[in-house]
Amino acid sequence: MTREPGAKVVPRPLATADAQGHDVLGLRGQERDATLAWMDAHLTLVRRSASGQRVFYWIFGIGLVVGVAAHVGGFLLESSVTTEPLTLMADLLYQLGQALWTGVVVVLFVEIWPQAKRRHYQQALDAYEAAVGDQAARITGESAGR
């Protein structure tokens, strides 16, 4: 956890309890204390995970892998079975897998890639504005020194 030098540290309650006395984390005793100590030691990572897109990327990755596996498994099962109920189940597994991995690919191109490009452009714009601001400050400093 990074703090600015001289910053006043305000103690905060480690966990709160609701009206019936249950802990918000759902833990008690040593388990609760150990969890709070770990969270305090890794607060930056926890905050980054809570506010970032990391969870979504993991979900999309898992969805893609499960979708492709179900699609391939359904195809192999569909081509090997001959009885009607198993053919239906194989077809459902095949279609579920296809829908799952296709949905992930669509989200990748519609949501994730444009967001990444937007962040890239924003970083470039911020760097440009910082460079122009530094150059303007340097010019102003030089003309004031004359």
Image (spheres, rainbow, N blue to C red):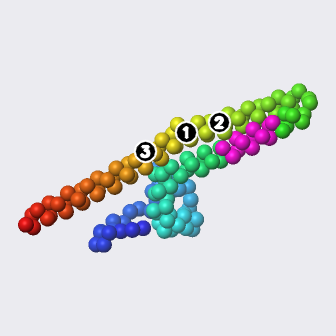
Residue annotated with mark 2: 102
- The residue singled out by tag 3 in the image is 118
* Chief secondary structure of the magenta portion: helix
Q: Percent position (x, y) of residue 62?
A: 65, 47
The residue where tag 1 is placed is 109
Q: Secondary structure at mark 3?
A: helix
Amino acid type at image mark 1: Phe
Q: Is residue 71 magenta?
A: yes
Q: Position of residue 143 (x, y in %)?
A: 11, 62
In the rendered image of this protein, does residue 125 appear above or below residue 13? above
As displayed, is residue 15 above or below residue 121?
below
Mark 1–mark 2 distance (CA, rounded to whole Å): 11 Å
For residue 48, say whether it is visible: yes
Residue at (60, 45) in percent of width and height: 60
Closer to us: 10 or 18: 10
Contact check, label 1 and label 2, Cβ < 8 Å: no
The furthest residue to the left: 146
Foreground residue, 36 or 21? Answer: 36
Amino acid at pointer 2: Thr
Q: Which residues are magenta?
A: 64-75
